[in-house]
Amino acid sequence: MTVVGAEQLEETAGVNIDDRLRQVPGFSLFRRSSSLVANPTTQGISLRGLGSTGASRSLVLWDGVPMNDPFGGWVYWTRFAPEQLDRIEVERGASTSVFGDRAMAGAISVMTREVDRFRWDAFYEGGNHNTHEVGAGIAGLWRRAAASAHVRTFSTDGYFIVPATIRGPIDTLAGVQFVAGNARLDWLGTEHRFFVKLDILAEDRANGTTLTRNSTSLGTLSATWSWERARDGISVMGFHTREEFHASFSSIGAGRKTETLSYNQQVPSQASGASALWSHRDSSFSTIVGADIERDQGTSTDRLTAIPLRIGGGNRLEHGIFGQATYKAGPAQFFVGGRHTFTGGGDTFFSPSGGVVVGRGRWRARGSAYRSFRAPTLNELFRDFRVGNTITQANGALRPETLTGGEAGGDFSGENTRIGFTAFYSSLDNLITNVTLSTGSTIVRQRQNAASATSKGVEADFRQRWHDFRLEASYLFADSRYITLLRIPQVPKNQGSAMLIYSKRGTLLSAGVRAYSLQFDDDLNQFILPGFATAQATVRQRVTKHLSGSFAVENMLGRQFLTVFSPTPGIGAPRLVRVGLRWN
């Protein structure tokens, strides 16, 4: 697990936390694009080179509540305000024995900063491309109760996502406007704790051509009750999410001179879920046992120009029971876990896991093995979509993906130095991917259980502190291939990052670089996305006790890199610069 604290989030440039998490080895979105302008359906997470379709193979939790889209499994990163968070825990490796099918490749837990006193903050940032962000938050703590609320709004004209060499009259800037807010009430008893939380998001995106846009409105209401004593605890959580997604799709003529509307799409969806768990711990033994249930429902309605209506949709009910136990014997700690899940459609699946950690002094060795799965999302089962002249068809006959894997690694933790490495191997069956059916002026693909695949590699991270300076570096090698030896799309073999930070009193300076080797955009490995590297920097200076100023730049050298090849190339963000003020 990698823990990214509030201080590290502040040190890294980026509007949303997906850009800031790219420092973590193996973390990337489905495509190379930032959530700043990417279509939401491409914002699924890839960890450890497993790749993703639009859907994540990783679960995202916010204060214990699932944040993956109920229809498609992707993540709306605009929901999270980085300045509101206490930490983010990135757990790589299958976690389905506790968290369920969406944690096939790992789990990301986002934790809100706890209320410890009365406080309020407000900030403004402005930048190139007519970028503006305004936010404010307030929190109060009383004897047994706490309340907090936060809101932020962001807008940018964005940038062209097609290279200038092929740009035509139909190409426009890809930008976004969104408003996100949340409110939370806590009851803080000596043994009992309870909180209820509401978070909402409204966003509108221009997708880079005259006729293509998408918009989303959603809200999640959740509540959690917990009871804690010295050795035992109980936790019960429930949530309900409602969402409305709209998108338009077009076909593009030769030379990008003409554009014809293909269809408008409307996707209402909702999800309801609950979980309960009991935990027990003593000096050498601990265990958790629990159960959970979730029901997702959604419908994709396409209003086409050629035929009047196309409707696809349904619902999915999942429920399971799980348990995990840990036993400590001298320098060794053993764990074993398992989950039995009803995945919907008559399928059941058992996910076992087990491992050992041995630590002595500053050294630690660890290893684990696991079996996991992911059920297809409603989006993969029922929703067709189009990107440029590439059409991707749904497939109602999809079966769950399965993964069997293991890992081994070690860590050294000194006073100023930390080194960690992990070697991993994953074998995947019934992998859901976009399979090319035909090529030509229009490319047709369909989601299919393509075959078997493997992902093997090594990840490493290094941290070193010298007085007021700190160096952080990470690297991932992942060789992810189908059984045919063709590489899994959207997975580079090599990726890494490094960042140097200076922090003293009220001054923060950080500069970093991220690098990626080439990857393929399709299952036939015909369309190459070359490797690239970008640099970014952040400066923060406290001006008074409560006021601070900031400067951030991403893609400092203005490197142009490809994000998609369909077969029209798409490009990522140019140089982005922001300056701001914060009152805290």
Image: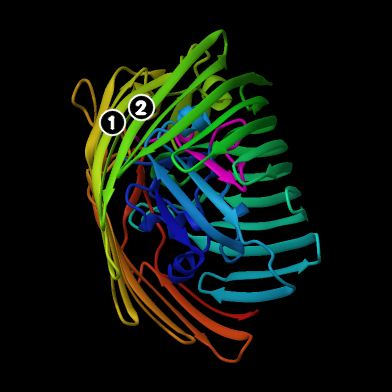
Left or right for 74, reference 313 = left
Residue 448, given in percent of the width and then of the height, sits at: 41, 18
Left or right for 450, reference 290 = left
Query: Dot 2: what SS?
Result: strand
Residue 414, given in percent of the width and then of the height, sits at: 27, 65
**Seen from this angle, which residue lies furthest left?**
485
Query: Does the image show residue 160?
Result: no
- Would you say residue 117 sits in the magenta stretch? no
Instruction: Assess disc 1: are there few (<14), some (14-19) or many (≥20) residues with their C-alpha within 10 Å of its C-alpha.
Output: many
Mark 2 or mark 1: which comes first in sequence? 2
Colouring rule applied to residues = rainbow
Query: Dot 1: what SS?
Result: strand
Q: Which residue is mark 1?
A: 406
Name the one closer to the observer, 390 or 205. 205
Q: CA distance from mark 2 to mark 1?
A: 6 Å
Residue 542, given in percent of the width and then of the height, sits at: 54, 87
Residue 370's disc is: 2
Q: Residue at x 41, y 21 (%)?
A: 401
Q: Are marks 2 and 1 in contact (CB under 8 Å)?
A: yes
Name the one closer to the observer, 419 or 364. 364
Q: Which residues are magenta?
A: 50-73
Instruction: Check the image and report above or below for 381 versus 283.
Output: above
In the rendered view of the protein, which quadrant contains the C terminus?
A: bottom right
Q: Residue at x 61, y 20 (%)?
A: 319
